Amino acid sequence: GFMGAQPEGKLREFLDKHLPSEGELAAEADADEAQALLESGDTQAALQKLADALAADPANDDARFDYVRLLIATGSFEEAHALLAEPVKRIPQPLRFEALNQWLGALEFAMTDDNADVSKYDLLIAANKRDFDARFGRACALLAHSQWTMAMDELLEIVMRDKAWNEQAARKLFVAVLELLTPPRPKKQDAVPGKTAGGIELLGKSSAEQDEATAMVNSYRRRLSMALK
């Protein structure tokens, strides 16, 4: 793309636009190491590596997402909030960060008082099937117990009865759960299969089981679409 000899500064300026910086390379290496540590069961070390990755490259949204996801999963809600503050203010708002924000809010609700007790909501809903506060609380409690599809079933009951309830809170949380359950495309050929974008372990790591997870997500997408008509 150059005509004739060019000074070093011009060549470096050109290359800098197309090659990753030292920080980006360091962040990628730390993120890869964090994944390996997670696979070995060393969650604390994985958290530190993800923190290092984000420190090396603050603009790395993949590292930020993985770090916040793991913080939420391990109950470090305050730190997760701090790291979500910037991406959730973006316009347009990145769906995967909004999904984390919704998940975080649901877990925080479930962790206060006895809100994680599913049985208390069963009694309320039995008395009044249109008690949407109880249904939403039950969905949050189910998420706290990693009952993802059951939580979506409960949220769908709200959407079918009142699409606009509480500023579409049920629909927003439903969409967030779908995003977290959607198996991501592998970043590399050696990416670890069997996990969703939310870091949720699938039942096994075979392609067939990942296909099953994708089919489940697509099924719930269709159900939501039908409910919103």
Image (cartoon, helix red, strand yellow):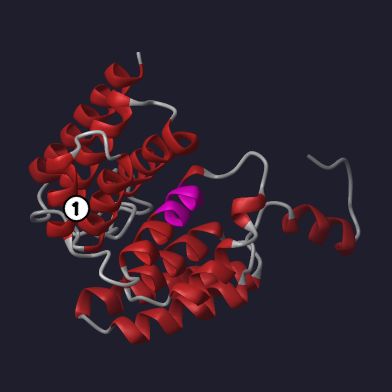
The residue to which callout 1 is attached is 121
User: Bounds of the magenta span?
Assistant: 96-102
Amino acid at dot 1 = Tyr
The residue shown at (25%, 44%) is: 135
Q: Is residue 136 above or below residue 9?
A: above
Tag 1: Cα neighbours inside 10 Å, few (<14), some, or many (≥20)? many
Q: Position of residue 81 (x, y in %)?
A: 53, 68
Q: Position of residue 128 (x, y in %)?
A: 20, 38
The residue shown at (17%, 32%) is: 215
The residue shown at (44%, 73%) is: 77
Q: Quadrant of residue 205?
A: bottom left
Farthest residue in the front direction? Answer: 127
Image quadrant occupied by the N terminus? top right
Q: Position of residue 206 (x, y in %)?
A: 9, 50
The residue shown at (66%, 48%) is: 90
Residue closest to the eye, 181 or 105: 105
Residue closest to the eye, 215 or 10: 215
- Residue 101 falls inside the magenta stretch: yes
Residue closest to the eye, 180 or 78: 78
- Is 91 situated left or right of 217 in this image? right
Query: Helix or strand or loop: what does disc 1 sit on?
Result: helix
Q: Quadrant of residue 23?
A: bottom right
Looking at the image, how many numbered discs can be counted on the residues? 1
- Is 83 situated left or right of 38 in this image? right
Q: Position of residue 197 (x, y in %)?
A: 34, 52
